[in-house]
Image (cartoon, helix red, strand yellow):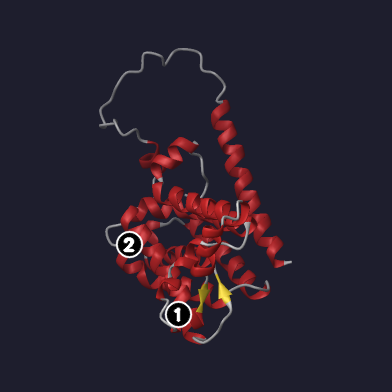
Amino acid sequence: MFVRTESFKEFIRSYPIITGLVALHFVLWFLIDFLQFPFAQQWLRDGVGVNAYITAGEYWRLVTPIFLHAGIGHALFNSFSLVLFGPALEQMLGKTKFILMYLAAGIAGNLGTYAVDPNSFGGHLGASGAIFGIFGVYVFMVVYRKNLIDQTNSQIVMTIFIIGLVMTFVQPNINILGHLFGFIGGFAIAPLVLRNAQPFSIWRTKRSPRDDGDITFNPDRWRKRRFPWTRLLTYVLWGGIALLVIIGLFGRML
């Protein structure tokens, strides 16, 4: 469920929303921080969550901070987290419900931040609130929809969620309210988006679009098989990403 074994082509085809979100993170970083185009830096100034400006009527700032990040490290960490924990939920919910849940959780995090201090001029940005919303849906499954998640994955979810929660309160410069209200938003919308959901299945991901379920004969089945270098490299790549996320989690706690 949380171990990525897909090739890049399979991943893009199977999880288009996750792919699009990660691509958007890096495109915005590339334009704003790397190339430093003036128009892109204006996007950053106009998109950062600033409560006082929201009070003045700039309501789009409840949405735009979800896609902006404070540098490449911030974008990488949130994107890796999304790649590891988002795909299973995208398959289970479907593309439309997943993006609605993601946006609802991110907006909930920004609304919570706004409600506590609507006149603050401090800025906040990042996808963390929406990612905590993903964990909110998973925790709802663990508590109320055990048929959708097995015990092993339940333990993984709860362990990573607790680590992330501790990190939220320990690490400085973290939008605590954004994380907490993002989680609450995901948990609250879970009963709606999980209607008719099915447990994650790697076979639905691996199945060819032309596979109609008929039994066929493979004429090459007796040929000597080559060593699966591509699959080995895929395991190494996703394992490296998982390691980077773990290092990021613990490194930000120190």
Q: Nearer the viewer, residue 33 or 143?
A: 33
Determine which quarter of the picture holds residue 209: top left
Q: Could you tell me which quadrant the C terminus lies in?
A: bottom right
Instruction: Please state the horizontal and vertical placement of residue 31, each as a whole percent of the image.
Output: 55, 53
Instruction: Please state the horizontal and vertical placement of residue 193, each as a whole percent of the image.
Output: 32, 63
In this figure, which residue is indicated by the disc labeled 2? Answer: 194
Regarding mark 1 in the picture, which secondary structure is present there?
helix
- Determine whether, in the image, residue 172 is placed left or right of residue 113: right
Please tell me which residue is depicted at 49% across the width and 38% down the height of the picture: 8
Amino acid carrying mark 1 in the image: Ile
Amino acid carrying mark 2 in the image: Leu
- Kindly report the distance in space between the C-alpha atoms of the residues bearing marks 1 and 2: 32 Å
For residue 186, say whether it is visible.
no
In this figure, which residue is indicated by the disc labeled 1? Answer: 54
Regarding mark 2 in the picture, which secondary structure is present there?
loop
User: Local crowd at mark 2 within 10 Å, few (<14), some, or many (≥20)?
Assistant: many
Determine which quarter of the picture holds residue 101: bottom left
Please tell me which residue is depicted at 41% across the width and 63% down the height of the picture: 102
Q: Could you tell which of marks 1 and 2 lies nearer the N-terminus?
A: 1
Determine which quarter of the picture holds residue 55: bottom left
Q: Residue 73 got which mark? A: none
Instruction: Please state the horizontal and vertical placement of residue 158, each as a whole percent of the image.
Output: 53, 64
Q: Nearer the viewer, mark 1 or mark 2?
A: 1
Q: Nearer the viewer, residue 227 or 79?
A: 79
Please tell me which residue is depicted at 57% across the width and 43% down the height of the picture: 238
Cβ atoms at labels 1 and 2 below 8 Å apart? no
For residue 239, say whether it is visible.
yes
User: Local crowd at mark 1 within 10 Å, few (<14), some, or many (≥20)?
Assistant: some
Q: Where 157 falls versus 114 (above or below)? A: above
- Determine whether, in the image, residue 226 is placed left or right of residue 63: right
Instruction: Please state the horizontal and vertical placement of residue 6, each as a whole percent of the image.
Output: 48, 38
